[in-house]
Image (spheres, rainbow, N blue to C red):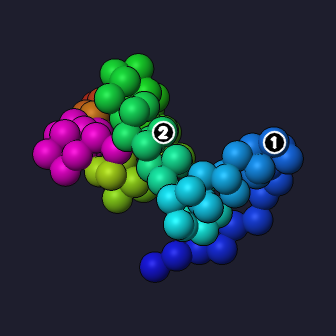
Amino acid sequence: MTTKVNFRLPDELIEKADVAAEVRHKNRTDIVIEALQEYLEEIEDDEKFKEAVVELYLDDDISFEVLKEFIGRQNAESIKVSRNLLEQGDSLADELAEL
């Protein structure tokens, strides 16, 4: 599945992408996709980045599926279980406080 994206890039970046596309016998879109994939693979190894992604999940800014893409299924499952336990603990604490 693909999504059409419309954004602006500096002219010099477009020129470089066009040259790279010609040299590699690809189109501009393929070059941009490859560059974005390489960038994302690079930052995914950064621990601070992973921590920020987890925070986004905990704040309900991203879905579990997106979290899984960045930190892996097993780690994402651990975070999900921990989050559920924390939420249950908060709920129990609220109930006990009312007694």
Of residues 19 and 40, the one nearer the viewer is 19
Q: Answer few, some or many: residues within 10 Å of disc 1's Cα (few below 14, many 20 plus, some between 14 and 19).
A: few
Q: Which residue is mark 2?
A: 39
* Amino acid marked by disc 1: Glu
In the picture shown, does residue 88 fall above or below 47?
below
Of residues 23 and 81, the one nearer the viewer is 23
Residue 33, position as x, y percentages in the image: 53, 58
Contact (CB < 8 A) between labels 2 and 1? no
Judge whether residue 51 can be spotted in this image.
Answer: no
The tag on residue 12 is 1
Is 71 one of the magenta-colored residues?
yes
Q: Which residues are magenta?
A: 70-85
Task: Give SS at disc 2.
Answer: helix
Magenta span main SS: helix
Residue 50 falls left or right of residue 59: left
Residue 93, position as x, y percentages in the image: 30, 30
Judge whether residue 75 can be spotted in this image.
Answer: yes
Is 8 one of the magenta-colored residues?
no
Residue 32 position by quadrant: bottom right
Residue 99 falls left or right of residue 43: left
For this orientation, the residue located farthest to the top is 48
The tag on residue 35 is none
Q: Residue at x 46, y 79 (%)?
A: 1
Q: Residue at x 56, y 56 (%)?
A: 23
For this orientation, the residue located farthest to the bottom is 1
Residue 87, position as x, y percentages in the image: 32, 40
